[in-house]
Amino acid sequence: MTFYNNNNTNNFEIWKNSEKYGGSKIYFIPYKYEELWSIEEKLWNAEFTHGMFTKHWHVSIYIVMAYIAGVYSLKKWMEDRKAFDLRLPLFFWNVGLSIFSTCGAWRFGHEFFYVLLNRGFQDSICLSFSPAEPVAFWAMCFALSKIAEFGDTVFLLLRKRPLIFLHWFHHAVVLIYSWHSATELTAAGRWFIQLNYMVHSVMYAYYAAACIGIRAPKWISMSVTAMQTTQMLIGVFISLYVAYLKGTQDINFVCQQSVQNMCICFTIYSAFAVLFTRFFVKAYIQKGERRKITHSNNSVKQE
């Protein structure tokens, strides 16, 4: 591979193998893992995987349509049935997703923190990661895991728990966007994937503990929601900054994110930021104020 220079700042490489599948060139920062896990060696094929996403990313839209139809069908089916007691299966489900997310955060984080510390923020959002290294394997796992996470909704419905719009909308949109991003290995996805892995490793551990009756302090649940909200706000900032770079740099400036993907990114992360912020305010701030008022009224009545 040939080394190139991005505005006389840092070197990068170009992966052209995707062009045979109708994909675009991938401008990436070279990073070599010192050791490979056996699963990364045996299951990873960069050309095949990237070709699959390039040709078939739109399948994610059909999967989401089936998911939404399934949600309404299962909700209807459960109307006249008692809620299932699924605490034990749900515990193992959450533990499994927490372990998976922790592994993803660790392995993907090798490349993420190397780039952030050695190449800086701008390169971390404008130059992608090597398609041939484990970082790409864990990016693929991330994209596929968004299908598995539909299981969260199934557990909610079978247990007859409230299903809010934010829950199913988030699951649906993230799947489509992650598959669309996989077609071009969106550089900003480096941040989205790493943050998501880190947040989910904590979030699912918290859910697992709740399944077996461990009541965590309120500040922990607040912290989990705050991390999710912060993740969305960072997504909005990154998409705006990428737009700024694309609009102000010269024509030779390289930023591995198409305008189409950037617009989708800004739209969904803005929506998520609003929805998660609204949820946080209603769940912890307004709810807390109502409790204070109730407590005050009770005190008056007792007097």
Image: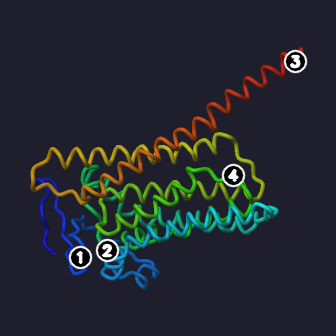
Element carrying mark 2: helix
Element carrying mark 1: loop
Q: Which amino acid does label 3 sit on?
A: Lys
Q: What is the C-alpha distance between the residues marked 2 and 1?
A: 7 Å
Q: Which amino acid does label 4 sit on?
A: Pro
| Residue at mark 4 | 162
| Of residues 42 and 72, the one drawn nearer to the viewer in this rendering | 72
Q: Which amino acid does label 2 sit on?
A: Thr
Q: What is the C-alpha distance between the residues marked 2 and 3?
A: 66 Å
Q: Which amino acid does label 1 sit on?
A: Gly
The percent coordinates of residue 144 (x first, y second) are: 47, 71
Residue positioned 49% across, 70% down in the render: 63
Which comes sooner in the sequence, label 2 or label 3? Answer: 2
| Residue at mark 1 | 22
Of the numbered discs in the image, which one, if any, rests on residue 54?
Answer: 2
Element carrying mark 3: helix
Q: Residues within 10 Å of mark 1 (few under 14, many from 20)?
A: few
Q: How crowded is mark 3: few (under 14 residues within 10 Å), some or many (20 or more)?
A: few
Placement of 33 over or under 217, stated as above or below: below
The quadrant in which the C terminus is found is: top right
Quadrant housing residue 152:
bottom right
CB contact under 8 Å: marks 2 and 1: yes
Q: Residues within 10 Å of mark 2 (few under 14, many from 20)?
A: many
| Residue at mark 3 | 301
Which comes sooner in the sequence, label 4 or label 1? Answer: 1
Which comes sooner in the sequence, label 3 or label 4? Answer: 4
Seen in the image, is 206 located left or right of residue 19? right
